[in-house]
Image (cartoon, rainbow, N blue to C red):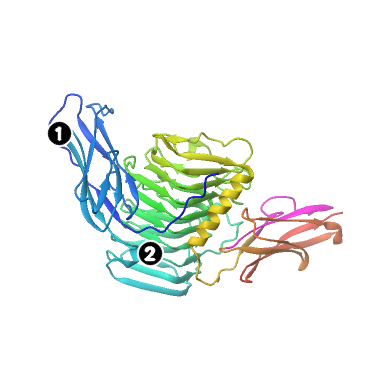
Amino acid sequence: MKSPPILLPLLTATLALLVSCGGATHPELAFLTLEPRAFTLAVGETVQLTGTLRNGAGNPVSGTVVWTTGDATVAQVNSSGLVHGMAAGSGTITAASGGDTATAAITVRGYRCLDQAGPTTTLSGTQTSAINNTSLAADTKLDASTAQFLTAADVAIKLGGNANVCYHGGQVVGQSPPSTSWSTMHDRYGMVARDAGFFQVEGVTLFDYGDGVNMDGQGTTEWSIRHVHVKYSRDDCVQNDFMNSGTIDSSFFDGCYDGMSSREYTSVLNGSANLVVIRNSLWRLQAMDQPYSGPLPNHNAFWKWSAIGPKLALYNNVFRADEGSEAGNGTDMFMAPRPGKLADCENNVMVWLGPGPFPETLPTTFKGKPCFTLMTGAAALDYWNSAVAEWRANHPNPLPDIGPPIVSLFSPGVTGSTTLAGMVDLTATAVDDDSVTLVVFAVSGDSIGAVTGDAPATKYTLTWDSHGKPNGIYTLTATARDAAGHTTTSTGVAVTISN
């Protein structure tokens, strides 16, 4: 069994690609194209550029592309167009074929975004009010390393206005019970970046929102998400619906209704020449009690991806699904990468714990490299748990646990009969930004039993003999406790015991 990917912290850098053509005219070659035309990478990272020769009809034709770098101390490029960020500075990468060229202008930043030049605002302690500032100066850094947001606002953090905004650290903890409707959660966002080119977010935890991080607006280009933890996201863990290029690195998406969205909800520019790189990250789909549609509970797919969405490059990621997607490919939902959208792929693992075969065809190789390995059964679960343990060890949380768990009755409640007779199964959904240790069920205030332990699938079920109470109408509740001792009691459900 292959070892889990090592999720190492990476440095931050920017690659802006400018395409120009010129030179001799060839009857069989009308132009040379370069993709992506703009992108962000970090020192020590790589990005695959693709130079394509096309004829007058726009169709690819055969030919040799030669790659060169203007400054090998800043960035290097191999014979296949794979660029490696080396050190802070600027330079060029040039693709050439005959007399036609395409040139990439490169700026490499050193280290993490918090240590870059620019004004710094420090946030600390418990924050009960939302941040809404879309007029930030360029290069603004927000150091939220010790900030913990507990706000009732639908959007906890909205930032933007200019390029190179950096948001670093802290927690954003939602408080919406699992029974909250999808339509309500759809409009709740942990973080929104509005028209902020080269926006960078790193080291933050976002729990219990509709969307974790939303890159909103056509101007939010070349974004990056690094060392971020999104947990229990009731819509998209990451939203990129304006089809921009970006990087996701060393992040953990622990419970997504949809993994990542690049599907337009309004008129947007065609993003087919853009690129999203996802590397060293963990993704787990989570069935939600209140989905968009379909039987309860369910989730959709890893990729909500439009035909005009960006290309995908996937390196050293682990994906986990315990069941298939409720919505199919006809709604732009894909459990495997959307066909035709892979730009590069190497050393990814799909952990499939659902019934039967994996529901779509995974690319096992890509240009001669191992692309996806499919794992099932106990070995797959062990692999996932090992990868999670490694990520957590590399991303310790130094902040106190101030957020209580969220809990709702699922059955009876969201579904199931409220008439109880004989032996019955009572199920609550409980989740915490850290962990749930205990769920206690009560009938009209009298405890009838408890379920212990953290359940990654969020469901806690107590089998109870309803003969323990006389016939009549009662109020059923569930109280969840987290590791810090915080408790939350669910909204009560009226039940009738009829034996």
The spot of residue 285 in percent (x, y) is 55, 48
Residue that carries the numbered disc 2 in the rendered image: 167
Answer few, some or many: residues within 10 Å of disc 2's Cα (few below 14, many 20 plus, some between 14 and 19).
Answer: many
Name of the residue lying farthest toward the top: 27
Q: Give the magenta part as a residue range.
A: 408-432
Whether pointer 2 and pointer 1 mark residues with C-beta atoms closer than 8 Å, the reply is: no
For residue 29, say whether it is visible. Answer: yes
For the residue pair 401 and 344, the one nearer the viewer reads as 344
The spot of residue 40 in percent (x, y) is 32, 52
For the residue pair 62 and 167, the one nearer the viewer reads as 62
Please report the residue visible at 51 percent of the width from the left and 61 percent of the height from the top. 393
Please report the residue visible at 63 percent of the width from the left and 55 percent of the height from the top. 458
Is 27 drawn above or below residue 8 in the view shown? Answer: above
79 drawn magenta:
no
- From mark 2 to mark 1, how far is it between C-alphas? 44 Å
Q: Is residue 282 left or right of residue 122?
A: right
Q: Amino acid at mark 2?
A: Tyr
Helix, strand or loop under label 2 = strand
Please report the residue visible at 39 percent of the width from the left and 42 percent of the height from the top. 312
For residue 268, say whether it is visible. Answer: no
Q: Quadrant of residue 123?
A: bottom left
Residue that carries the numbered disc 1 in the rendered image: 99
